[in-house]
Image (spheres, rainbow, N blue to C red):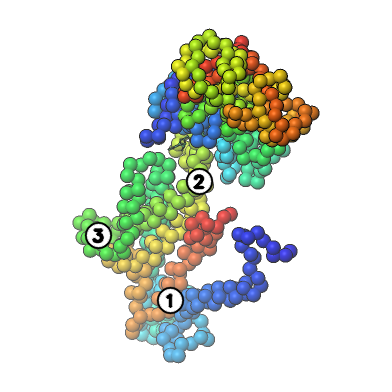
Amino acid sequence: MSSVNSAHSVVAPGATSKRIAATIVIAYALITMVPLVWIVMTSFKSPPDSISYPPKVVFQPTLEGYCNLFTTRTRQTSDYIASLGAPTSTCDEITRSRNMVIAGPSNYWPRFQNSLVIAFGSTFLAVSLGTFAAYGFSRFKVPLAEDLLFFILSTRMMPPIAVAIPIYLMYRELGLSDTALGMILLYTAVNVSLAVWLLKGFIDEIPREYEEAAMIDGYTRMQAFFKVVLPQATTGIAATAIFCLIFAWNEYAFAVLLTSGAAQTAPPFIPTIIGEGGQDWPAVAAGTTIFVVPILVFTVLLRKQLLRGITFGAVRK
Amino acid sequence: MAEIRIENLRKEFGSFSAVEDSSFVVRDGEFLALLGPSGCGKTTTLRMIAGLELPTSGKIFLAGEDVTFNRARERDIAFVFQLFALYPHMSVRRNIGFPLLAQGVAKTEIRSRVEETARLLQIDHILDRSVSGLAGGDRQRVALGRAIVRRPKCFLMDEPLGTLDAEFRDLMVRELRELHNRIHATTVYVTHDQMEAMAMADKIAVMNHGVIEQFGTPQEIYNRPATMYVADFIGSPPMNFLRFTSGLRKGTRSVSLDGVDIPVPEIQQDLAQGELALGVRPEDIRFSDASSLRGCVYASEYHGTNQIVAVEMAKGLVKARVPADQNFRIGETVGLELNYEKLSVFDCESGRAVASSRYAEHHHG
Ligand SMILES: Nc1ncnc2c1ncn2[C@@H]1O[C@H](COP(=O)(O)OP(=O)(O)O)[C@@H](O)[C@H]1O
Ligand SMILES: [Mg+2]
């Protein structure tokens, strides 16, 4: 086919420009992936390998980092270790080879669970509240709608951590410090403004005739909302959910400040993993690797919606 | 099925008045076309009848019941939207069955009624397709199916043929009217296309700037336009206006145009000296050398069965529809003879007719 096009149409890219674009994209992807690959590699190194200089690219992989991540260990005499029966697991064996025995589970799994509960809980709340609020702003004459929307947006204008001290004091007063509920509420509050704005854009795009048709056909507005509007807003909801989840999952500053025990999330916990003689880098890397997995899975599953979400509807189905 | 009665309906958006004091009745089983240019308030009127918009004042009765403040879902009406509003995440079958689901109709009955409706509209072969891939005509039929499956009190349609191409429109106009003849549902059909309105409607309401200028049968609207606006909006080419200044007494039966006396239908009221217009449809003009009303042929447009000849007169350009076999030279002087029985006289200041053709008078009142 010839490349004759009307004046305003976009000419299909030629082979050379495609190749150049592909090179740039691949190079960028590789550069971005280096830290991730580094972390995953480190998680399979032994402690001495992890700090050797120059860094080892080829090494003997071991699960020691993962064992150390999930356990606490105590040093024992070799006589005592010899007196024990056969090792019950790979980790047991690795630990004994270091002249130690497993004393019990570490706090990583409870911290990881906290992260799951708090991140998904706050994402669910922010997206639900955001969807209803966005629908209201999109469809009804809300008094002072413009001002309210601006107010909602303005909560994002300074970094949330700027209000850390008042929030810390408030939380202490209210008994919300170091509780999952407190963290869910906090992350919801931060995310809901983003959710309202993103979702309003998506809902504005859905013609109101759909729910009007449903209401004429005998449904209440609420039924019309759930049966007709929501199914068509799924793309926007998924994109918004990813944004909220990534923020809540990765949030570090508030987590350090407000959680220390029962409700501590993984990000403030991971750097505190200490082995004998300092930071246990393979264990830290293992903790980080596992921590990245849920976001990775979520993002890969919803990548289409995410793409449309970031381009704010510019990419059509 | 039911009668729709609108009393003094008004709708304001802020300080803007979209619909002004409308009153009309659509009798049980009647097909009303709400006709007017874009922005004149047709959709707003329809949405108030549907319950999607609350009137600023006035009343709406469905089957004698005051439903002015009832919710849309309590009115038992069906609405066909301009862009159909088919639910994109549902199949054709689910789209059509959706209103029945709301009423709690049993699954098996929904199935049989959807299929019956689909057969009526000849879309039973696409029932399990997704609506997003459908062609315009099929989308139209699915939207109609969703409307009729519930057998509502009445149908409201907002320019349902607006997005179809011209050829297909003619077909759908016929199908819609046939459907109406079969199910006799009280229908309000909004359109800006006078041909559609003329072809389908039992009654037409012509709207302009939120005001219903005239309500009547297509014949009344065409032959006895109540205002200059209606006369100009209906017909192609529209009615010619020959302007003159005069005062007239009630009961007068002739007017003087450039010194030529022209008999007209009886003037209905006393008029002080002012600007008036004699209205004449292009087909009510004949060429006759004997006539003392003269003009000069300006252009001619051939239409096969007839031709439209534009004649330059002292009063301006006048268009006449005459047989195709008459020959004219451009610039030739001709005499024009008017069909006096079918003339209208308008008061230019109010725009209202002060004398109308007697044709179709028996339809009136
Ligand atoms: N929700 C609204 N808010 C403000 N103005 C409106 C609204 N809906 C319609 N209008 C105005 O009312 C007038 C009539 O609109 P509409 O009934 O849609 O006209 P039509 O259907 O005859 O084209 C238009 O000028 C339109 O701009
Ligand atoms: Mg309209």
Height in image: A297 above or below B347?
below
**Residue plotted at (48% across, 87% down):** A56
- Residue A206 - label: 2
Please identify the quadrant where the N terminus of chain A is shown.
bottom right
Direction from residue B267 to residue A291 in the image, left or right? left
Direction from residue A92 to residue B136 in the image, left or right? right
**In what element is the residue under mark 3?**
helix
**Residue plotted at (69% across, 65% down):** A3
- Residue A285 - label: 1
Observer-side mark, 1 or 2, equals 2
Looking at the rendered structure, the kind of residue marked 1 is Ala
Q: Disc 1 or 2, which lies upstream in sequence?
A: 2
Question: Viewer-proximal residue, A20 or A26?
Answer: A20
Mark 2 residue crowding within 10 angstroms, few (<14) / some (14–19) / many (20+): some
Q: Chain of mark 3?
A: A
Q: Which residue is mark 3?
A: A167
Residue A14, image x, y percentages: 65, 70
CA separation in Å, label 3 and label 1: 31 Å
Q: In the image as oriented, which residue stretches furthest toward the front?
A: B259
Question: Viewer-proximal residue, A106 or A117?
Answer: A117
Looking at the rendered structure, the kind of residue marked 3 is Ile
Question: Viewer-proximal residue, B41 or B263?
Answer: B263
- Residue A231 - label: none
